[in-house]
Image (cartoon, grey):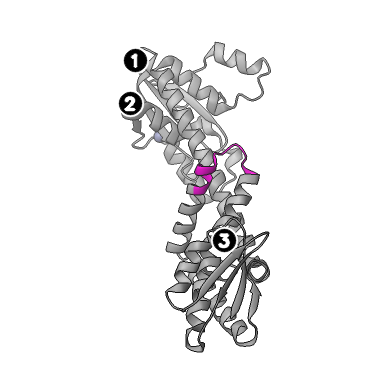
Amino acid sequence: MYVFEWTPGMDVESLCEKLATCVGTVRWWSGEMVYIGCECPPDRKRRVASILAGALVRDWLYRQLVVHVQQREPSLMSDEIEYGVLSQLHDLRATKARFAGDDLDAWEAKLAADLSAWMEQEDRLSLPAFARFRMRPLLTALTAEVERRMHQMRLEDEYEESLRMLRYMLNEQPIVKRELHVFCAPERIWMTDAEGELIRDEEVLAAALAGETDVDSEDLAMSILITRSPCRIILHDLDPDAPWPRFSETIRRVFRERVMPCRGCTTCWSHQGHQIRGDELLDLPWSDGAVDGQGLDI
Ligand SMILES: [Zn+2]
């Protein structure tokens, strides 16, 4: 008779049901700890080991991740966390993402081989202790990845929420028959009218200069754009490799059909030329373009 210690609070019944499909006698009893006992003929050891490895790499790992994320992101609802962890695990398995050298299927196979070898020598084993020892590198790498993804998911939710708010504010403004040009460069954003005259919104600028240090140039540009509500925005995207969330993308998502990409102007051309030559971007004389006025920061 083999006796395996299992983790309290986890679904022991379904594990026993799986074991019962290949061995004759399975019993479990629980108190402070949960124990599973099974009679296992020699020719079934590998099958039992692979069922146990499956329970560790799927159920046990899932439970560890849920508990970890609950501690790190206490503002998230628990069903949100459970769903998030489950879908991340599914995705990481499907894409064969590697953790500490192996993907999840390879880890499962490796653990099954270890358990099978163990069963040749011993008849008692604490599965949680085995998992904590053998799966530590997997758990560490996987936890970091799931945490990063959950964090990104939360940021994306917040971003979508802010887009909804900006759309709402824009819908409150009457559409003005006017074209504005928005230039998104790596180190600054600026706007001009159709004639190339630099746009400055005195009120918004004054508010920013009055010490509201958390108003950045993107917020400022968005306030000006929403207040002016132009019927057409020509977007000069000089920073296609900007990190998420890209401001040019935010403009597209908020102003939708009013946004047209620049089809080529002297500013875009000179920017590309500088990039190809690998010049220091921060020192670029942005005001050299035909439509970007004095190149003042907003
Ligand atoms: Zn352009």
The question of residue 12 being in magenta is answered with no
Q: Secondary structure at mark 2?
A: helix
Q: Amino acid at mark 3?
A: Leu
Please, is residue 262 above or below residue 62 in the view? above
Q: CA distance from mark 2 to mark 1?
A: 10 Å
User: In this picture, which residue range is highlighted in magenta?
Assistant: 72-82
Q: Circle 1 sits in a helix, a strand or a loop, which is it?
A: loop
Local crowd size for mark 2, using a 10 Å CA cut-off: few (<14), some (14–19), many (≥20): some
Mark 3 and mark 1 lie on one chain; the one further toward the N terminus is: 3
- At horizontal 42% and vertical 30% (from top left) the residue drawn is 251
Q: Which residue is mark 1?
A: 175
What distance separates the C-alpha of mark 3 from that of mark 1? 54 Å
- The x and y percentages for residue 191 are 47, 24
Read off the residue under disc 3. Answer: 61
Residue 281 x, y percent position in the rendering: 57, 42
Where residue 185 appears, as percent x and y from the top left, is 51, 36
Q: CA distance from mark 3 to mark 2?
A: 48 Å
Look at the picture and state if 228 lies above or below 28: above
Circles 2 and 1 in contact, beta carbons < 8 Å: yes
Residue type at numbered disc 1? Ile
**Which one is nearer the viewer's eye here, 211 or 114?**
114
Circle 3 residues within 10 Å: few <14, some 14–19, many ≥20: many
Numbered label tally? 3
Foreground residue among 214 and 270: 214
According to the image, label 2 marks what residue? 258
Ligand 1 sits in which quadrant? Answer: top left
Residue at the spot 52% in from the left edge and 14% down from the top edge: 201
